[in-house]
Image (cartoon, rainbow, N blue to C red):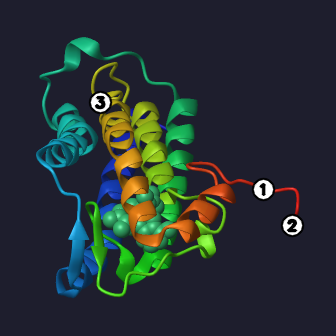
Amino acid sequence: MTQFVASIIWCLGIATWLAIRWPHRRRARKTKIVAHRRSAGERVALGLTILGLVVVPLTWILTDLVEFADYPFSPIQGWIGAALMIAFLVMFHLSHAHLARNWSVTLELRANHELVDTGVYGRIRHPMYTSFWLWGLAQLFLIPNAFAGATGLASIAWLYFSRVGEEEEMMRAHFGEAYEAYCGRTGRLLPKFTANE
Ligand code: SAH
């Protein structure tokens, strides 16, 4: 694999990410919100993810502004990056498909919000965030630049750590014991396999 092919794979990954998200975004606009925890910090975190995962790598591909941090590309890193990009897209698609009308880009509860605990949510509480970490890793491998390769992971870390506690608190406040029990049988980012199954 060449550096050029790795950049094409990155671009195709971004296009597929947008295509997967599009119908969910449209449906979400039509589904009533009954509670939310949107904040200025939340908006900043979302803005930073777009910057770190899309704008910076695109700048690296299209300009020589961050060329100073380039390092030699190795084909194996391109293959690893491609595999991570596919894993990201599969996980991203599954989390949207299984969360369905309960999905939001931010922290919101919709009318008749259901606690989803099946499919990819059966063993993992935050599969979409798992997919985001995979996306950040894919970028690290596909973009051979110490700065533009790493900004994705940095912005994911910011979003994840600033948001996951607040999101779980919102879910606990709404679903009470049911969410508490759900937390007990799932892992945050990696599947939990309990002994008594
Ligand atoms: N953190 C989840 C979902 C991200 S989308 C993941 O990583 O897969 C964010 C919205 O999903 C939140 O506003 C919350 O209302 C909703 N949500 C999160 N977990 C949920 C679940 N198990 N069932 C239903 N809705 C959920």
Residue 109: quadrant of the picture: bottom left
Question: In this picture, is 178 found above or below 124?
Answer: below
Residue at left 46%, top 78%? 97
Mark 1 CB within 8 Å of ligand 1: no
For the point 14% across and 24% down, the residue is 64
Q: Secondary structure at mark 2?
A: loop
Give whichever of discs 2 and 3 has the lower sequence position.
3
Q: Which mark is residue 151?
A: 3
Q: Where, quadrant-wise, is the C terminus in this rendering? A: bottom right
SS type, badge 1: loop
Residue type for callout 3: Thr
Label disc, if present, on residue 66 of the rendered structure? none
Indicate the position of residue 123 as horizontal and vertical percent values. Answer: 66, 62
Residue beneath label 2, please? Answer: 197
- Residue 118 higher or lower than 196, as above or below: below
Q: Residue at x 29, y 35 (%)?
A: 155
Q: CA distance from mark 2 to mark 3?
A: 40 Å
Label 3 environment density (alpha carbons within 10 Å; few <14, some 14–19, many ≥20):
many
Please report contact status of discs 3 and 1: CB closer than 8 Å, yes or no.
no
Do callouts 1 and 2 mark residues in contact (Cβ within 8 Å)? yes
Percent of width and height locating residue 158: 31, 35
Say whether marks 2 and 3 touch (CB < 8 Å).
Answer: no
Q: Residue furthest top?
A: 68
Q: Secondary structure at mark 3?
A: helix
Look at the image and tell me whether residue 16 can be seen. Answer: no
> Would you name the residue on which mark 1 appears?
193
